[in-house]
Amino acid sequence: MTCRRIGAVVLALLLAACGKPSGGPVELRLWAMGREGEVVKELLADFERDNPDIRIKVQQLPWLSAQEKLLTAFAGDVTPDLCQLGNTWIPQFAALGAIAPLDEQVARPGGLAAADYFPGIWASNQLDKVLYGVPWYVDTRLVYYRKDLLAAAGFAKAPATRDEWLSAMRVLKRRNPERFGVLLPLNEYEQLLSFALQQETPLLRDGDRYGNFRSAEFRRTLAFYAGLFGEQLAPRVSATQISNVWDEFANGYFAFYISGPWQIGEFKRRLPAARQDSWMTAPLPGPGGPGASLAGGASLVVFKASRHKEQAWRVVEYLSRPDVQRRFYALTGNLPPRRSAWSGSALEQDQYAAAFRDQLERAKSPPKVPEWERIGTEMRLVTEALVAGQMTLDQAVTELDARADRILEKRRWMLSKGTTQ
């Protein structure tokens, strides 16, 4: 047999072998970020035992570079089968056409119970009523406060309204002028955003084509926020200027602190024993009672390019089970997005988590446009200038609208063409 004929036979055998099913398990690629990327491997061991036809290769990504890596993977057509996405990233990847709609899978008999999820968290994964992600864990912002300082000032419970909150902080300031009511780091905009989500008027208008920061409601919200600094109820500092937020909280440098659920564990570990009975959590005060707050967290998505969408969905269903979410919470401290997952867990017995359970019923997502994170950055920069006295309130809201309108220019053009893809 000639070398040419031998080569042809070998090639034919190789091609035939490629066309045959291997008979082995399907391998799925799952990308996850940070600590979750470590923990999910442990959770999936039981899934692989019960599903021998599926094997999952987990790639852990650092949060700081994850979004860029995902965009590069999409551009190169090498996306994973499924992935963890921050809730605010959903609009961007949906607009790109990178992630698959999931309504059909959720609607199947015996599928995920959408009504079991906190409504604002579920809604953060929907665009034009189409579901693109399933909430994996959730966070929101509320108030950590020194209940002993409030009691000494004559307040028996945490404030429920903004007016009550202002009254309490003013009394605390009069009692000790060198200290402050609340810490609102100027390099963070999530606190102001949470206040703004308590208003009925949306932050963007006309189908999210333009900024709506000159609305009467946002002006009142921004005036309330800036007034906290103007009355010296909040220090004009960034987070980097506070060397140790837990020490300063323990020392009474500020009595209120707005943050997320991860701080429960930090306060338990870092506050001195003498202060462990002096703090508590409470829902974020609103204009007329406990108000809304930011709906954050991460979701599970399936990529459109995956050749194994059904198997990927089985993984999403497994990680969404209440019992698995309870294990996930025990390993990470991440709050479950399903109400049923809170039942029978350590969360039910945690006095500090109770306020988060309450707050999650009123959590709301920011505007669901791919450009929102850029607009949020401009919100931080403009309000920092306002607090520093470099802008008036009128100038600040006008500038915010102008910057948002510039960022949304491409969106308006694409919508005029009948697409945002």
Image (tube, rainbow, N blue to C red):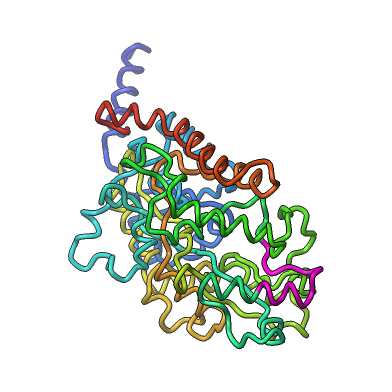
292 and 365: which is toward the camera: 292
125 over 171 or under it: above or below: above
Residue 383, horizontal then vertical, whole percent: 61, 47
- Note whether residue 334 is visible: yes
The region drawn magenta spans 169-183
Residue 68 magenta-highlighted: no
- Nearest the viewer among 127 and 179 is 179
- Magenta-drawn stretch contains 171: yes
* In this rendering, position of residue 238 left or right of residue 3: right
Q: Residue at x 49, y 60 (%)?
A: 40
| Quadrant of the drawing holding the N terminus | top left
* Picture residue at 36% right of the left edge, 35% below the top: 96
179 in relation to 28, above or below: below
Quadrant in which residue 252 is drawn = bottom right
Residue 358, given in percent of the width and then of the height, sits at 45, 76
**Position in image of residue 56 (x %, y %):** 43, 53
Q: Position of residue 113 (x, y in %)?
A: 27, 68
Residue sitting at 32 percent across and 33 percent down? 420
Q: Residue 120's image quarter?
A: bottom left
Report if residue 98 is visible in the image.
Answer: no
